[in-house]
Amino acid sequence: MKTLSFRGGIHPPTFKEKTQEQPIRSFPQPEKVYLPLLQHTGAPLEPLVKKGDKVKRGQKVADVHAFVAAPLHASIAGTVAGQQDYPHPVRGTFSCLVIENDGTNEEEKAEPIQENEIESKEPGFFRDWIREGGMVGLGGAAFPTHVKVTPPEGKTIDTLILNGAECEPYLTSDHRVMVERSKLVVLGARILCRACGAKKILIGIENNKPESIAAMREAVSVVPGEWEIRSLPAKYPQGSEKHLILSLLGRAVPPGGLPLDVGVVVSNVQTAAYIGRMAQTGLPLVDRVLTLTGDCLVSPANLEVPLGVRLMELVEFCGGLSSEPRKIIMGGPMTGIAQVTMEIPVIKGTSGFVLTCDLYEKHEYPCIRCGRCVTTCPMHLVPSDLAKFSEFRDFDQARDWYALDCIECGICAYGCPSGIPLTQHIKYAKAEIIRRSRKGGK
Amino acid sequence: MEEKENLIFSPSPHLRDATNVPWIMRQVVFALLPASVWGMFVFGFWNGFLPLLWSVLSCLAFEYLDCMIFRRPISLRDGSALVTGMLLGLSLPPGAPFWLAVAGGGIAIILGKQIFGGLGQNIFNPALVARAVLLISWPRAMYTWVARVNFALPDIESGIAGLPHGVDVVTTATPLGLWETYGLAAIREVEPSILWRLFTGQVPGSIGEVSALLLLVGFAYLLWRGIVEWDIPAFFALGLTVIALAGGENPFFHLLAGSAVIGACFMATDYVTSPMSRKARIIFGLGAGMLTAVIRILGAYPEGVTFAILTMNVLVPLLDKLIPVRFGVKRT
């Protein structure tokens, strides 16, 4: 099948050369971890342990009775030192479980799953199993995986897509996972496929990662099932779910819809790799691979890190700072979140940290109506006008011009020659529209 | 860790590309340079250079004055006044008097742009506003054409070989002027290679509009730089061709003569006064091209580009309501 593309998009500099050749390094078991009780998109968790309890690595320490939530497991073996408010990369501060390492390195594991058992087990078994493993999307949004693979009544899933696009500049963790752990990715994909009932597995990888493509092709050649590895043109935001589905299958997710509306489940390759690891070893999601990079670091790296390790420890492990950062971004530079402290812990959604001195600031001019934002918007919106409506607080008009379709990819602000923070204006309008509709207004 | 104080907190995206408004304006100026230099060659250096210089200086000065009087930040840095000055100067007749260029600059900047609220707010292309006002107010000054003798066109009425010898610069008629009075066939009798001369720019006319070739070179540069898109000029040409054919005229002559090329490539494509979505731009270009031909064929003026584009400018706010079909919705 011909690879389709999508209208709009940009080609920002990738900055990936800093880390794309760097093998994943393991971060040693730390002295202490800070585990925020909000790790994913969904309901906050309630602790299952209290101060003074002994916990093993892999032991469930927090959970909640809510569908859109995934439990949290201790990432080191040790003693619960307590629960306290601590800096959180998304929420500013949030309640954290603090665990102190007792040096025993004891692990609590689930029963491993044999490869030949996958087909004989029911999808429902795997959905519970994935939830118990605390699996969430590791691409950045951290949406609980078991929710994704559970299609609502009347919907069927025919295709599982693994997202290996990694279109954000700087980040290379997914790339390294595909190169080094392709077998785990494939194993995890088979379980995801069984859990959601898909017939076919498609893996989309941007063509600037030939090593990944080759590794994945080799890995799928020895397993049963219908697989396809597709090389996609490197273009931001190729890794956006909706655009990936369009490029791979030619199916357009309707506005306000989800991938499962077009019979698709999309999962990040790293999520699949950790599901694969859990099948192999029984260890739930207690680590993740992330990229620590930027022009302020002595040696940028791809690291496998236990959840709850703080950024300052990561920086120290990588040889420290070469210059003082002016901006710290969790995630990639296009959609990531700026941080105010190096104390923030790694959470499940931490795809990387970018520490930079280069602020890419632009002088702000009036909008000259050049139309760049309109031609590059991958959702086919008119960002310049949406931003104006937002500025004038005309949120009804913004809603009528489909502000809620915006995926906040940042392209409009990236390319604006007038340096207008278009994405910020639109995000504000979106938040206001949602807030007002919740209040029961129009 | 003591970085807290120095860290910058701002929403994503944290990356920006290198384009900015002054850079874009500079590229437009570069793109207009070949045609400007050619104008100085065809019409005599001072005849080409001085009106251009006065026009640019007057635009810059009026912008500065306006910002001073209305206590706005001085906006010269954005480069838009420079581009307006260039476009206005290039659309003046060679040897245009000092006062004409200065008046044009004032009209362009004050009436054409600042009165609407400055850069980005104006409805009409400022250079074209000035050109229209000058055409109506001082038609004699705006319709006096000179050119170096090699590039002049013979006056059909007074005899074919009537070009004087021994002088450098002569008063002459423009191709469109002759066409309005005598028709294309009569021009071809005295100058069989008129289309080639129009394409290369060996004809009388406004300072910057004569060489289709060099204007297209400049436009190609802007295309390569990703500053303009091809759609407006292409559909301008299409609209012009359709109406010219319908009116029994030679479309090539109309595409090459007068301000068609500079208008389609540099004036109709002005960011501020053209629509933003592809669909709307196609309608805009098509409309401007068709109106140009209609005015030329039926109107009192030999040239229609100025009024055609100004007319379409009015429609831009309406055309901008034609927003693209959003992602995930089938075209109906």
Image (spheres, rainbow, N blue to C red):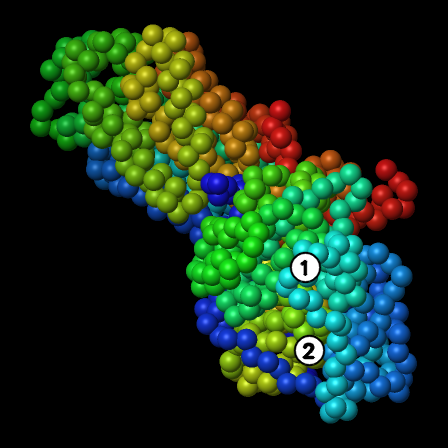
Report x, y in % for residue B76.
Answer: 50, 51
Quarter-of-image position of residue B36:
top left
Report x, y in % for residue A382.
Answer: 62, 40
Q: Residues within 10 Å of mark 1 (few under 14, many from 20)?
A: some
Q: Is residue A28 visible?
A: yes
Q: Which mark is residue A374?
A: none
Q: Earlier in the sequence, mark 1 or mark 2?
A: 1
Tell me the amino acid under the disc marked 2. Pro
Q: Quadrant of the C terminus of chain A?
A: top right
Q: Residue at x 74, y 71 (%)?
A: A111
In the image: residue A96, left or right of residue B312 = right
In the image, residue B131 sits, relative to residue A251, either above or below, namely: above
Tell me the distance, in whole angstroms, between the alpha carbons under discs 1 and 2.
28 Å
Kind of element beneath mark 1 = helix
Q: Which mark is residue A118?
A: 1
Chain name for mark 1: A
Q: Nearer the viewer, residue B206 or B276?
A: B276
Kind of element beneath mark 2 = strand
Please tell me how many numbered marks the rendered image carries. 2
Report x, y in % for residue B170.
Answer: 19, 25
Report x, y in % for residue A317.
Answer: 59, 85
Q: Residue at x 30, y 33 (%)?
A: B207
Q: Is residue B22 visible?
A: no
In the image, residue B179 sits, relative to residue B110, either above or below, namely: above
Q: Residue at x 75, y 85 (%)?
A: A106
Quarter-of-image position of residue A344:
bottom right
Q: Nearer the viewer, residue B256 or A258?
A: A258
Q: Which mark is residue A306?
A: 2
